[in-house]
Amino acid sequence: PNTLSSAGVEIADLDGDGDLDAFVVNEGAANFVYLNDGSGNFSAVAVDALTDTSKEVALADVDGDGDVDAVVANNGQNRLYRNNGDATFVIEDIGRNYISDGVAAGDLNGM
């Protein structure tokens, strides 16, 4: 097990295998995905090497490609984790470098 200061967790099928995985954000350490093998056993995979002070995560298909992406609120630069469909991510800075304590995802334009 990892000893981390976790701040938020969201559950979704992140690797497209039909079972629920967990995206966990941490304060001052890398963020992790815990992949479910289908039998309730989880393996931890670091999704970044960043040491942001992450506060919260929201999961949604942000780019409309059919897989679940993550939006992470940080004490500093907020980030979008674009899922490649297999629980590997391309990380993009979003917004300005603000202190954020929360994040929510939703369809704002109805499209």
Image (cartoon, rainbow, N blue to C red):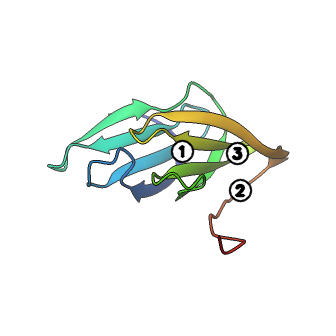
Q: Which quadrant holds the N terminus? A: top left
Q: Which mark is residue 101?
A: 2
Q: Position of residue 44 (x, y in %)?
A: 35, 34
Q: Position of residue 67 (x, y in %)?
A: 45, 51
Q: Position of residue 6 (x, y in %)?
A: 51, 45
Q: Residue at x 39, y 48 (%)?
A: 14
- Name the residue nearer the viewer: 102 or 59: 59
For mark 1, what is the residue?
25
In the image, 34: left or right of 105? left
In the image, 52: left or right of 18? right
Q: Which mark is residue 47?
A: none
The kind of residue on which mark 2 rests is Asp
For mark 3, what is the residue?
74
Q: Earlier in the sequence, mark 3 or mark 1?
A: 1
The kind of residue on which mark 3 rests is Asn
Any part of residue 20 in sight = yes
Image quadrant assignment for residue 101: bottom right
- The answer to whether residue 107 is above or below residue 2 is below
Find the distance from the CA under tag 2 to the CA under tag 3: 7 Å
Q: Earlier in the sequence, mark 2 or mark 3?
A: 3
10 Å crowding of disc 1: few (<14), some (14-19), many (20+): many
- Name the residue nearer the viewer: 56 or 78: 78
The kind of residue on which mark 1 rests is Val
In the image, 68: left or right of 82? left
Q: Residue at x 45, y 47 (%)?
A: 23
10 Å crowding of disc 2: few (<14), some (14-19), many (20+): some
Q: Position of residue 9 (x, y in %)?
A: 47, 54
